[in-house]
Amino acid sequence: MTQLTDRATPLSSAAAEDRGRAAALTAAFLRGAIAAGLGLGTLAVLAMALWISSPYPESGAGQTLHVAAALWLLSHGIELVRPDTLSGNPAPLGLVPLSLSVLPVYLVYRAARDTLDPDEGRVQLTSLGTVATVAGGYLLVGAGAVLYTAGGPLIAHPVRAALALPLVPVLSAAAGAWTAYGRPRGPLPLWLPRTVRSLLVRTVWAPAALRRGAVAVRAGTGAALLLVGGGALLVGISLVWHAGAAHESFLRLAGDWSGRFAVLLLGLALVPNAAIWGASYGLGPGFALGTASTATPLAVTGTPALPSFPLLAALPHGPGTALNWAAAGVPVVAGLAVAWFTVRVAAPPFAVREEAWGAGATALTAALGGVATAGLMAFLAAMSGGPLGNADLAAFGPVWWLTGAAALVWTLVLGVPAALLLRVWRVRERRVKPVPEPEPQVLEGTVDGASGESSGGPSGGSSGGGDFVPRQASRWWAPWRRNKRKSREAPSSLDILNAVLDTPRDGTRPEGGADAPSEADAGAAPGTGASTAETAAGTAAENAVGTPAHTPVQAPARAPAHAPAEVLTEADAPAEASGPDREAYDYLPADAWHERGARQARWAAFKEASGDLITGFPAAPPPPEPLSPPRSPSPPRSQSSPQPPPEPLSFEKSGSDKGRGSDPGEGRSGEGPGVELQRGPGGPDDRPGVTP
């Protein structure tokens, strides 16, 4: 019984896994069919809308649905056939509007990617199984569309449809599966011979080679996009240049608004084709306008057999001019783009020579980028052209191999040398140029730093003893420069303090480098301290903001009488203030800094530096009235009995405490030595003794 139970578990698990795999395959198949149905249904709805809006429809709804199915097959690159022609011979239609091809490619890509998204409780399919099932569902709907178009105005040949239709779903589903797996670069297939695999691993499949290949593909894709964009620009310029002919052709094709709207939609669907034709025109080979005519920048040869259509009406005519030759700028830009995309990885900006790729690797990568550009342009040229009928209309569009060869030549000739030159420029040795220090401009009549006397001119002495740096001339056309200069020249409180402390006593600097008090200072009156301090602080503030003084400055001789201060001499200066590298200076009293004149000068300097944003110096407050000390209540005394002078306090040990030791641990809880507060014999004391 136990053996049967143990065997039942794996059997049921295998069955559940098989059922889950079958459900996953069915879901993938349905996703492919739904993708095909969405693309076919979109064109069917658009065709039915145009048929309904047409005032004079020539056919019924069935014929409209046949046309929609035929256009859906044409978007996959399947050539259609028009059986009913004026000549009676079936005419092929193989010019594929590339805008219609975007929708089926995206739908299949999205279906395959969503199928492989991890979902909890669902069996994960392999990439090969996903591609097969999604493409199978899509092809089932495509086969039905081929059979449905058999009785319509546009017929798809069954054999050609069987060869061309599977390409779009298979390639798009493979791209979606690769994206779902994170775009891996898996190992080489096992069916390759061992020697071939080892050779590929050492050369093409090596990490460095893979990186160069990725850079080359990126460069080739960017150059191809630039070529197509440049071709679209050429088409737009030509449409503007031949606007009259294009407008006349547009009005001739349809007379009602619904028909004109259908022509407009067809023109928009053919815009990518026209951009690729313009790129081929800029590359040089041009494009075919039937079997007997070709349009190139040099000339339009032959007699083009052009149907009436707005895009074809904008084609150039006759021999080429300088404007036609200017189309060669498109491949020039593409070649330089190959070089730039290559060097941005091979030698990034500010790269070191050792970190950059070698010249050979850079040239090889640029050449591979040119090859990628040529391959992409050849593929796009082949997809953008096709027949529009028989005889002269059997060939329209660029020749794919000529377009690819021209793209290869342009990118190799321009891209490889440009990549090498750009690499040399980026790995060059860069030398840092030393920035010279700006020399201060000296005014005429500068101050001699040793003596402090003016060497000429009215600009007197400087407290610091250096060269005056003149103010820059104000610019009337740049008022913000004056504000910036004023904020840069605004003195700080530390500058004003240093200026006040460095002011000499007599306005000049004596020889020897140290300021010594003069006899005139010694005999100065005490009452002149405030006014002299105001002059000194005012001069210091002027020097701080950069305005030279024109009169000698008198420092206060000594502090006012009400606050005497001691002036330190050079001998009393700290040790670090004296030495061979330091200049001795005078230590002024601190009262000169706190005087009202010095404070007023500092306030004026702050006001000027702030641009008059603060108010003026506040007025001096009135002196406070002296307050009489509070009197303690005392008993009335007679005037005749004089008050005895206070007796000094005396601290004596009490008798009970005499003889005890003075242990610091004693004295707690009344056990330690006590101290009594006693008065002398001056009078009775109303306070008790204090015993701590």
Image (cartoon, rainbow, N blue to C red):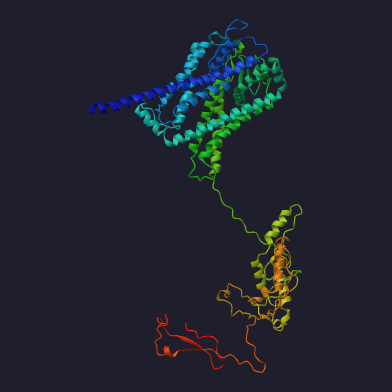
Residue 419, how many percent across, how many down?
A: 54, 37
Between 306 and 566, which is closer to the camera in this rendering? 566
Between 179 and 476, which is closer to the camera in this rendering? 179
Relative to 34, residue 570 above or below:
below
Image side of residue 445 versus residue 369, left or right: right
Relative to 164, residue 6 above or below:
below
Image side of residue 77 versus residue 523, left or right: left
Observer able to see residue 412: no
Relative to 223, residue 287 above or below:
above
Observer able to see residue 3: yes
Q: Residue at x 56, y 42 (%)?
A: 425
Q: Quarter of the image for the N terminus: give it.
A: top left
Q: Residue at x 76, y 52 (%)?
A: 477
Relative to 412, residue 69 above or below:
above
Q: Quadrant of residue 576?
A: bottom right
Image side of residue 307 versus residue 115, left or right: right
Residue 136, how many percent across, how many down?
A: 45, 19
Between 641 and 414, which is closer to the camera in this rendering? 641
Residue 110, how many percent across, how many down?
A: 50, 26
Q: Residue at x 61, y 29 (%)?
A: 229
Q: Report how many numbered discs are placed on residues in the image.
A: 0
Residue 451, how many percent across, how many down?
A: 68, 74
